[in-house]
Image (cartoon, grey):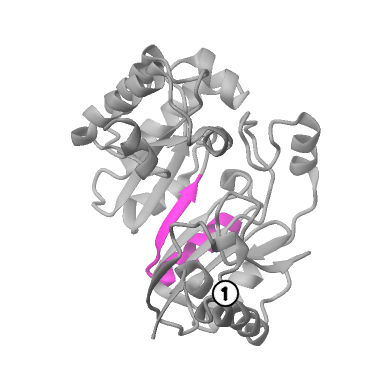
Amino acid sequence: MKYKCCDALLHKLAINPDNINFCCSPYDNKLQYLDNYNGELIDIEDYKQRRNYYLEKFKAGDIPEPCQNCSHCQEREWDEKIGFSFISISSRTKCNCDCSYCVQSKGDPNTKHWLNTRESWDVKPVIKELYNNNLILEKCIYIIGGGEPTVFPEGELEYLAYIGLLTKANIVILTNAIIFNESIAKIISMADSELKVSVDAGTKETFEKIKRVKKFDTVWKNLAKYVKATKNNPIGRVQIKYILIPGVNDSMKEIKAFTKRCFDIGCTHIEIAIEYDWYGENQNKPISNELKEALLYFKSLRNKGVFFGDAKEWFEAQIK
């Protein structure tokens, strides 16, 4: 049977500090599985009931409001078997960085302090239960985020990665690279894995303006070590991200300094994104000549591993 639906509802799970969602969109408006969540083991029968509630809506053509304008909602035949091909773990909020565009703190210092000091629950039993019930599908996309994974309690990052290895998952680790972590280096040296680091700057001044920590040289030094760790692993990589913030880091001077640093350390996976609040407000407006020049420059470097990530269609439309 063909019907309009989304793989997120059927096979994805985003585990957050106080809720679990079917969808890992950064926007607030999305399908939620559990609210007021505090680390309880997932009741699979309850999960089935909640998923089926939305599934029946999709089959009836009654598309839930958060999904109505989403490009991931497509009409086709869907596999409805229970099991997760995508798991995002972001249960902790402590972070040793202070990004101005942070989706958690929104740049507010008081919120940042609360995020860094709030009590967090232990996600390990939740993941163990999913694994023991064969609900983590082999070769799933398995994202370990935060907060910042390098400041997790001792052994937690290693345990989560171990479950990823057992399921032959594509392990994706989101870090700011302020702290070099030997366990991360080992994972990307041997497993199907990806280390993602959003640097967003090519100069120290802009880095400190956006990231609001004085760790520019440290981050690039650690990135070079991580790239070296993947040298003999064809299925391990370091992906450096540049989130464009128009008016802040979209000058050609900044961008060329960034790409030069990436190439100098041997990085061949460079993702270009757009700051999502700016995108939400301006996606239907003309872009500046400076931003267009930046996008054309990034496009010219495709043969060196530079690519447009989120909002790819929008990027391509701006430079036709």
Secondary structure under tag 1 reads loop
Q: Position of residue 306 (x, y in %)?
A: 29, 35
Q: Is residue 62 visible?
A: yes
Residue depicted at x 68% and y 83%? 46
49 in relation to 65, above or below: below
Residue placed most toward the observer, 156 or 272: 272
**Quadrant where the image shows the N terminus:** bottom left
- Residue at image position (63%, 46%) is 147
Q: Residue at x 75, y 31 (%)?
A: 108
Magenta residue check for 142: no
Magenta segment range? 156-174
Q: Is residue 275 left or right of residue 232?
A: right
Residue in view at x 65 percent, y 58 percent: 16
Vertical position of residue 201 compared to residue 125: above or below: above
Can you identify the residue that label 1 sits on? Answer: 62
Tell me residue 280's x, y (percent): 56, 39
For the C terminus, the quadrant is top left
Q: Is 251 or 66 nearer to us in this picture?
A: 66
Position of residue 86 measured from the top left corner of the image (x, y, whole percent): 47, 66
In the rendered image, the vertical position of residue 168 relative to residue 265, given as above or below: below
Left or right, residue 196 beside residue 94: left
Percent coordinates x, y for residue 45 in the rendering: 64, 87
**Looking at the picture, which amino acid does disc 1 mark?**
Asp
**Around disc 1, counting alpha carbons within 10 Å, would you say few (fewer than 14), some (14 to 19), or many (20 or more)?**
few
Callout count = 1
- Considering depth in this image, is 258 or 28 the residue closer to the camera? 28
* Residue 159 part of the magenta segment: yes
